[in-house]
Amino acid sequence: MQKVKEQTIQRDELIRMLIQIIGKTNERIVNLEVKVKNLEDEWKNRQSKTV
């Protein structure tokens, strides 16, 4: 019974770690999307100024 409890605790810790990693990854993806959008806007602005 003790072994099952320890395994459950370890599983829960791993799940928490995975959730943190996924959260950080999603945050990075959102930051990259914002940077790409800003670069696209800047590119459009430069194109409209040169034409």
Image (spheres, rainbow, N blue to C red):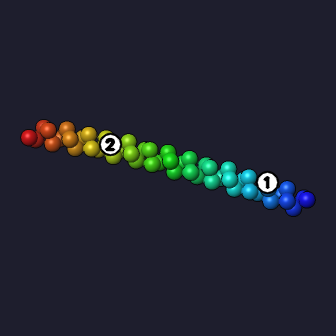
Decide if residue 13 is on the left or right side of residue 41. Answer: right
User: Tag 1: Cα neighbours inside 10 Å, few (<14), some, or many (≥20)?
Assistant: few
- The amino acid beneath tag 2 is Lys
Return the residue found at the far right.
1
Task: Describe the element under mark 2 as helix, strand or loop.
Answer: helix
Q: Residue at x 29, y 44 (%)?
A: 39
Specify the quadrant that holds the N terminus.
Answer: bottom right
Left or right of 44 in this view: 15: right
Q: Is residue 7 above or below residue 19?
A: below
Q: Position of residue 40 (x, y in %)?
A: 27, 44
Left or right of 4, for residue 30 = left
Q: Going by the picture, which residue comes out furthest to the bottom?
A: 3
Element type at mark 1: helix
Dot 2 or dot 1, earlier in sequence: 1
Tell me the quarter of the picture where residue 2 sits.
bottom right
Residue at 87% across / 62% down in the picture? 3
Look at 54% across and 48% down and name the residue there: 24
Depicted 20 relative to depicted 42: above or below: below
Residue 10, quarter of the rendered image: bottom right
Residue behind mark 2: 37
State the separation of the CA atoms marked 2 and 1.
Answer: 42 Å
Q: Is residue 45 left or right of residue 5?
A: left
Percent position of residue 41, x then y: 26, 40
Q: In the drawing, what numbered circle is on residue 9?
A: 1
Query: Where on the picture, by quarter, is residue 51?
Result: top left
Residue depicted at x 68% and y 53%: 15
Amino acid type, label 1 = Ile
Which residue is at the front of the view, 38 or 2? 2
